[in-house]
Image (cartoon, rainbow, N blue to C red):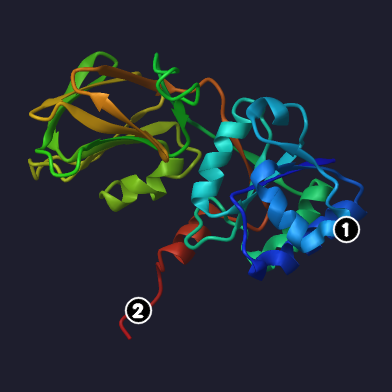
Amino acid sequence: MRIALYGRGFGPDYDGLMKEVLRVLRNAGTETIVYTSLMNDIMRCDAENADYQTFNTYEQLKDKADVLFSFGGDGTMLDSVEYVRDTAIPVLGINMGRLGFLSSVSSNETIDAVNKILKGDFEVEKRSLLELVGEEQRFKGINYALNELSLMRKDGSSLIVIQVFVDDKLLNTYWADGLILATPTGSTAYSLSAGGPIVAPNNDSFLITPISAHNLSVRPVVISDKSVVKIKVDGRCDAYDLSLDSRTKLVDKGLQLEVKKAGFSFNMVKLPEKDFFEAIRKKLLWGNDVRN
């Protein structure tokens, strides 16, 4: 099996864990390819065996891995989308961050999870992505998002006016701080903090969630992910922030955006004992008596 290791880096506290992961992979005879920015940390904890191939781009990873391990938090896993793109390489999120909805494997579960992967004891869960149509140059070809597309007014500017059309029919004109168009995966991210619903990841839907809308009767809307959404921003400000997950650009008002479901999925590794609703209960402390 061929394994790719991806992450932004890790501190000495995780050296022991990473050394054990590398030992397990080596004993299983895997071919291991490491993200370039991770190599310094790999060298620190396992210098004598650190003769690995490296990758730094999508092209260098393509056709080189059967599974990718993402070491970090949910943000790191979102960043991994840039490198796997349409390769269909399944991604396992190993949580070295905090909340970890996407990076569901904790540090003390890592070795067991790695062994399951090597035995083929896992499923692949396909997660839909958003695609921003016609803006490939603005986002350097990475014009899609696993969690959400968001529009936000610039710091200190007045409310922005956002017209949203679903399949060329006007949904609403929002006077708000911004708007989120989220996937089911993104329903537990920014959209949730703005009052959006939690949607199970196997739903074929998108969420439209306003951010601090001026009209208090405005509520989030769930639509089919087969729909094409068009968005136009107006208002007193000349520009606004447009984000795809963690990638943000300043965009002039008046530009019409078109968003649809991407033509490929993000393949997420799902281990047998992991369950979405269990994760929700655990992460959001549902069912816990927190009065004391």
Task: Tell me the distance, in whole angstroms, between the alpha carbons under discs 1 and 2.
Answer: 48 Å
x and y percentages locating residue 268 in the rendered image:
61, 41
Q: Nearer the viewer, mark 1 or mark 2?
A: 1
Relative side of 228 to 39, left or right: left
Circle 1 residue = 48
Q: Are marks 1 and 2 in contact (CB under 8 Å)?
A: no
- How packed mark 1 is, by other alpha carbons closer than 10 Å (few <14, some 14-19, many 20 or more), is few
Relative side of 186 to 156, left or right: right
Q: Quadrant of residue 132?
A: top left
- How packed mark 2 is, by other alpha carbons closer than 10 Å (few <14, some 14-19, many 20 or more), is few
Q: Quadrant of residue 16?
A: bottom right
Q: Nearer the viewer, residue 44 or 33?
A: 44
Circle 2 residue = 290
For the point 50% across and 32% down, the residue is 128
Relative side of 149 to 78, left or right: left
Q: Residue furthest bottom?
A: 292
Badge 1 or badge 2: first in the primary sequence: 1
Work out whether residue 71 can be spotted: yes
Identity of the amino acid at label 1?
Glu
Q: Dot 1: what SS?
A: helix
Q: Quadrant of the C terminus?
A: bottom left
Q: Is residue 182 above or below residue 286?
A: above
For the point 46% across and 27% down, the residue is 144
Identity of the amino acid at label 2?
Val
x and y percentages locating residue 114 in the rendered image:
76, 55
Q: Nearer the viewer, residue 96 or 276?
A: 96
x and y percentages locating residue 273 in the rendered image:
66, 58
